[in-house]
Image (cartoon, rainbow, N blue to C red):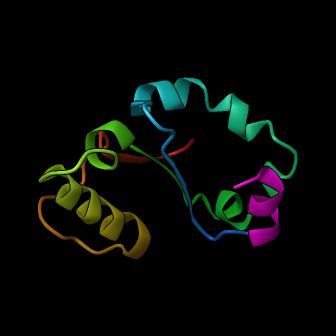
Amino acid sequence: MTWDDVIAARPDTVLVLPCGFPPDRTLRERGLLTSLPGWDELPAVRTGDVWVLDEPAYFNRPGPRVVRGAEVLAHVLHSVRAGDPVTEAEARRLG
């Protein structure tokens, strides 16, 4: 998806999970995203609904961890608890 497509979509929620990046690295490099033109105008940014997820742990490997990834998404997207509570290591707001 291009950045222009993201701006045009005006998302209410943004999930940040670059392929192969654990959350700590994503957070260290967040300036690459937050400095893009139009970032501050996105509805998700204005409401604080931008999430960094642990992509390597839950979203790119087949197996039981995929279920945990679905539980994390349920929490982030719908404020629904499915399974164990979601930890900050699994999903945290981009601040």
Asked if residue 63 can be seen in this view, the reply is: yes
Residue range in magenta is 1-9
Which quarter of the picture shows residue 56? top left
Provide residue 29's location: percent of width, then percent of height. 60, 25
Res. 55 image quadrant: top left
Residue 45 in picture, x, y percent from top left: 68, 57
**Residue 31 found in image quarter:** top right
Looking at the magenta stretch, what is its main secondary structure?
Answer: helix
Going by the image, does 37 lie left or right of 15?
right
* Residue at horizontal 78 percent and vertical 51 percent from the top: 3
For the C terminus, the quadrant is top right
The image shows a total of numbered marks equal to 0
Q: Which residue is the extreme one toward the right?
A: 37
Point 18% across, 61% down: residue:
67
Res 54 seen here: no
Q: Is residue 63 left or right of residue 57?
A: left
In the displayed structure, does residue 76 sit left or right of residue 41? Answer: left
Instruction: Name the quarter where the N terminus is drawn.
Output: bottom right
Q: Is residue 37 above or below residue 44?
A: above
Residue 29 to residue 56: above or below:
above
> Residue 34 colored magenta?
no
| Relative image position of residue 53 (x, y in whole percent) | 41, 46
What is the x, y in percent for residue 78?
39, 76
